[in-house]
Image: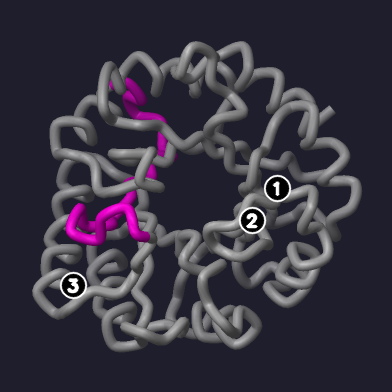
Amino acid sequence: MIPVEIVIAADSQENIAKWTRAAIEGGASRIELCAEMAHDGLTPSDQAIMAAREALGALPGLMVMVRPVFAGASGSFSYDKPMINLMCRQIEQAAAYGANGVVLAALQRRQANIHLGALRQLVRTAKRNRLSITFHRAFDAMSDSRSAIEILVDIGVDRILTAGSAWGGKNSALDSVQTLSQTIRQAADRLEVVVCGGITAEMAPCLLAQLPGHSRISLHAFSGVLSLAHTDARRVRALVDATNS
């Protein structure tokens, strides 16, 4: 069986190099670098990206959130033209400072659908800079996720991040197995499905046992690998081992 990769979200607010190393020492395959995790993740600073890259050395797997601070904590994923241009600059800066991929989305204002023009611009910029692309949990805010999958495949997105439940809800991934299974089946290895939603070492085996095929599934954790509000290498290792035992 192909190992299920573990993605660790890391808050860039302090000592990001230390917590990046902890995630990698624990066996994580990718780091999703964000600022303001209390606001569901915003674009980190250039300094944070450089610190994370230095901590990783030549290892791949540095994914950088691209979500302007102007979106605030409201959960809005719609952006005007100046913000899209800003996001393109942030993508270019992320690449320049050593990112391997970006995590982003763009939805239509007042409609829970993909903003095709904006997303195409963002994807073109990322691909021009040789970055992989994850469409983040805006996926869970859309009214028609089945159509969205086909659009994302067509546009050239590499992954989607989903908890299988409505954005802003309290359900864990384990509560949303049916929806997650439908998403995985439809993606059909055309997209990697990055499963989030309260992922822990205790949950992971039960969750994976109920999901179809693991060839293009990964697990995304944040709070489930923290100790005293910081990434704990032992908790990451426990999740890696539980997932792939």
Q: Is residue 149 left or right of residue 68?
A: right
* Residue 84: mark in rendering: 3
* Measured Cα–Cα span from mark 1 to mark 3: 31 Å
Query: How many circles with numbers are drawn on the protein?
Result: 3
Mark 2 or 3, nearer chain start: 3
The amino acid pointed to by label 1 is Ser
Q: Is 37 rendered above or below residue 159?
A: above
The amino acid pointed to by label 3 is Ile
The amino acid pointed to by label 2 is Ala
Q: Is residue 70 left or right of residue 131?
A: left
| Residue range of the region highlighted in magenta in the rendering | 55-74
* Residue 172: mark in rendering: 1
Q: Is residue 60 left or right of residue 69?
A: right
Q: Pointers 1 and 2 in contact (CB under 8 A)?
A: yes
**Residue at x-position 42% and y-position 82%:** 114
Q: Position of residue 137 (x, y in %)?
A: 50, 60
Mark 1 or 2, nearer chain start: 2
* Residue 163: mark in rendering: 2
Q: Position of residue 25 (x, y in %)?
A: 52, 16
User: Which is more toward the observer, 81 or 54?
Assistant: 81
Q: Is 13 rendered above or below residue 221?
A: above
